[in-house]
């Protein structure tokens, strides 16, 4: 087991996917211990800091990377297993942000309204209790919320030489903001360039489905990922696998197109795994599938389509790579 | 405890909400044992029946009702608690339908494609094992799926004298097609006319989130509902309450508008229940909420916004009516 | 030439399409002189009147009718030719309205913003100069705008027993709010019930494409229409014909679905008229078509798809009915 | 008057906006004679060529450029005046393309349908008669269509270091596909990087509004553009100006968001030009504006919002630059 560390200096963070030299090179089967900054680049530190005055829009969501995966070529699938995701500070931050969020006029859903109030919430993180404490700003309501750490932004270099701001999720992954990207889950990403060029960041100590107000519990993270490669098995959109579910994603607007992409991909994947023809797979997914929103606030919205793995009978997903990565993660954890 | 029965004759089924004379009158606190037909009106009976040739579009989804609730007036909230929902036949049916379903061109998402194949699946219902057996049509794959019976269509007479086809969900409820409308759950509907005029139908032995192919496991049902009334507590959209969650719904297009409606309603509801101001409630919902799709196939799409009730602390929802209806349901069940 | 008059009393105005007894019965080929109220029912009369406090949402857009067309049966097409549309008062009114309009949060595009300011503009109508004078409310800018009178709301009883609020355009016509519905144009509507049951109202002294702020120059009208019938020639959506263009409409959300409906209908219509197959007609429409927005504010948005009639060569549209109605209109005008 | 020529070699065409070295450097006030390839890179040459088999998706729409404009800095506005746009070959080509076009399932509006037939139409270009002749493929219908040449794709390097495929229109311009980009019109683009880095291509001998089938009359072009710079006058989205109209654009999904962006920009622009406050400008635009679709097929849809310049009274747009460029164009033409 080869273990790498990636702890970018402030000037090394990236704000795009694509077009950057790697900070680290690894091989399939390697482990990377990686630190990531919060979506504000760690620059919001006091309750009365105003994020939009401190952080320009194009400097939101710094990512750690890219990580070059040796041997990865266009047409392969990169497997990123989240071994652990641990909040790195004693606090996490959430905020509204002018013209951002599902219940606000935005730059795209352009209206004549003034922006909503920009309000900031600091949550106390208690790793021992595994909670983050919500404190209302306009009353004395407080509540300890269970942690459920995840990475909002994980992706690779886009195809065709594109360079994309980290904020926009698309076929290359990116800012999908799904709570499914938690420890114990494997994310599958299409490889578009030699080396794949993986980057990740935007940790959330927890996040509801839809990321309604536009932010989760934004948190710097100390994470461990296991990386592997599936040769010659192209996928059109990012997928995920947990112990219990296979999951397809779609990122687009309007939201029904994100839904359609994710469901069509899940139907096709189910068909491949079970031998069902397309319409029979459509039927099975229709009756057994779950369809949670991931984000309804980013430049592309993201929907997730989930199917319980038991419905696939003995089908082996990508040659059983998720189970092998689970085992590798256990081995790593035992070694610490 | 007053118990009524409603078993409509074939000619008594309704295909609209609004504008119809009641089949039954009940009082708040009453129980109704009601039989409902499947979405095909029971007219698809053999594997080679072609639904679109047998059932005109305007005769899909017959509903049982209306049930007049004495004392209900515009501005009240009708509470419909699902005591039990039991498949009435030994089979349930699912099908694709020309120009219907999330992954098909439709009458609204109009395209130049030929319709997808119209395929019908018969599921064997086993009430003892509590399963429905899926049989692929183009391979020998079979799978026993757990039952999770629900009503896809439950609603009241619309406001302003409108009469709406049952297929279109809106503020009056209707064809929301959410799997959350299962036994043990209370549905809250705005009252728009004297007597409320409740109707229900479109039972599904189970259904995935999104009702992707356009149909669930369509099944005639023998259901029991408990009916109650909350005076003077107007709600803009249907809501649900289970033992663990409060839920808001939104039915609109595009899907992000259905999402926005449901989330805005949940934020407002949370604010009322907790005393949080709007932005603090927005924050709590953003971090603790779930956002599953209900249907992405009907003339309006439906999204559900869910919040765990423990996050509301000691807040009492509609005066604790859900718990009282749970108790009434238990009393009813014990009496049978 | 038979000429009828329809001047509804205040209590006779209708706020729905469908389910109403006719105020008048006419035969194909007849002329109707009809007076219509403005969208506020004539209740906004002074610059400081606040529309949302004076007119409940469900009482916006009163229509004159229904007019029963003897002989009309489901599957026929009703032709309504606008002979003349003349503002009936010395002023027209436009306003913003809370949670209405394309650049505002709405009940469907639900957000947490406060409503935009509700502002009212009174325009002086000068029939001789054929202008309406815009007066800015917050500066001394004034401008004489050319009149271009039209009816925003024209429709028939919906199919399947539905009764719809006048505000929602759909397959039955209704509140399409297209400036194309001007004098000299023929509107074709599908007949869904015996007698068709035509109603119209919501006159605008003029309106931009998209009806961006949610209202045009709202004006009571004295209009003259010529009515005819095309037997056995069902159409799925309202169409229009002017001297120079055939036009299809689509009313739906999101706006691309309204676009798709209108374009698909125009492709099919062009195919029928020219003998081109579907893809060749798709090509011709793609290169020669115009696609203006009608409304982007109503519960369904409306797009118009236009094709110059010269591209159809000698094709005769609905047997040349538009030219005959033009001639009838000229005869009527000469007789006055 | 300085006149440049830009005739890229096949290997010099670009398929992205951003991240490329300039092929040419010019100064404000210069003229550029530029040749552009058709959207197929000139590789479709015979009626039975199948575009999707000949041209990979990422090689559609080659553009000529970038052209560096000396002195241009972020926050400036680049003015591109189309002096002339002349088809360069004796034919233009249109085609359907698998999973592309407004009336087809696409990669985003993902469905289970097979792709529509991929059909190719060759149009004969007659510069003398100024026509392109449509020939139906499945009947003997032919029709001479008037030429109305335009560039579908014109843009600059995006902000924040992004590199975008030419096919996606956004704030940097790009593949807006509006017929308004014709000779005699000035296009205003935000400058995001030093030198602006202008590229253009995708000429259409003509195109209907909406580019419904996904292509116009695709044609290599010999074009002449005049380039100028407006210092310190940032705009959020591309705008256009003709002799008669000012025009704002918006490129987004769903189509109503493209509409909203374009209308909000036009309202703000009108407010600046006339001194009307925002709501008064909203009112004027609502009554006098036009709102044609540009494209409803590209990864972002584009809407145009137009206002007649006479309604602005004596307001001078960008210091009268359009008139000066018109004069420069006349001077150029006289010199040829």
Image: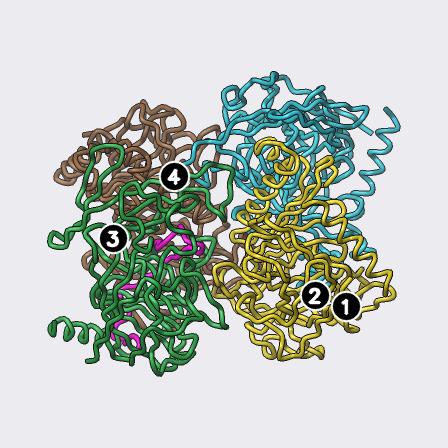
Chain colours: A cyan, B yellow, C green, D brown
Q: Specify the farthest residue to the front.
A: B71
The circle on residue B203 is 2
Q: Which chain letter goes with mark 1?
A: B
Q: Are marks 2 and 3 in contact (CB under 8 Å)?
A: no
Asked whether D309 or A272 is in front, the reply is: D309
Cα–Cα span, label 2 and label 4: 50 Å
The quarter holding residue A148 reads top right
Does residue D92 appear in this view?
A: no
Label 3 SS: loop
Q: Are marks 2 and 4 in contact (CB under 8 Å)?
A: no
Label 4 SS: strand
Cα–Cα span, label 1 and label 4: 57 Å
Co-location on one chain, circles 4 and 3: no
Q: Which residues are magenta?
A: C293-318
Does residue B334 appear in this view?
A: yes
Is residue C313 one of those drawn in magenta?
yes
- Between label 1 and label 4, give the one nearer the viewer: 1
Residue positioned 49% across, 63% down in the render: B162
Cα–Cα span, label 2 and label 3: 49 Å
Label 2 SS: strand
Cα–Cα span, label 1 and label 2: 8 Å
């Amino acid at each position: 087991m080869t273990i790498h560390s990636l702890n970018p200096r402030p000037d090394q963070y990236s704000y795009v996917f694509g077009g950057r030299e790697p900070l680290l090179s690894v091989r399939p089967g390697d482990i990377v211990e990686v630190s990531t900054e919060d979506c504000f680049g760690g620059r919001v530190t006091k309750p009365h800091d105003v994020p939009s005055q401190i952080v320009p829009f194009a400097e939101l969501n710094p990512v750690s990377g890219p990580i070059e995966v040796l041997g990865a070529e266009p047409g392969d699938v990169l497997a990123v297993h989240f071994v652990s995701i641990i909040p790195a500070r004693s606090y996490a931050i959430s905020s509204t942000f002018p013209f951002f969020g599902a219940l606000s006029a935005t730059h795209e859903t352009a209206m004549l309204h003034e922006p909503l109030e920009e309000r900031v919430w600091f949550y106390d993180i208690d790793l021992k209790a595994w909670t983050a404490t919500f404190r209302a700003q306009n009353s004395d309501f407080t509540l300890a919320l269970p942690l459920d750490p995840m990475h909002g932004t994980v992706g690779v270099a886009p195809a065709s030489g594109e360079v994309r701001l980290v904020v926009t999720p698309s076929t290359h992954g990116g800012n999908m903001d799904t709570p499914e990207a938690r420890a114990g889950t494997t994310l599958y990403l299409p490889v578009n360039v030699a080396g794949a060029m993986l980057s990740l960041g935007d940790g959330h100590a927890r996040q509801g489905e839809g990321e309604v107000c536009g932010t989760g519990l934004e948190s710097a993270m100390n994470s461990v990922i296991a990386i592997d490669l599936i040769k010659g098995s192209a996928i059109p959109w990012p997928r995920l696998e947990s112990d219990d579910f296979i999951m397809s994603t779609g990122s687009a607007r309007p939201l029904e197109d994100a839904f359609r992409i994710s469901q069509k991909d899940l139907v096709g994947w189910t068909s491949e795994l079970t031998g069902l023809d397309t319409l029979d797979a459509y039927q099975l997914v229709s009756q057994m599938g779950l369809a949670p929103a991931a984000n309804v606030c980013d430049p592309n919205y993201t929907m997730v389509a989930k199917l319980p793995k038991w419905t696939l009978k003995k089908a082996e997903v990508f040659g059983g790579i998720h189970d092998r990565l689970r085992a590798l993660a256990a081995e790593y954890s035992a070694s610490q």
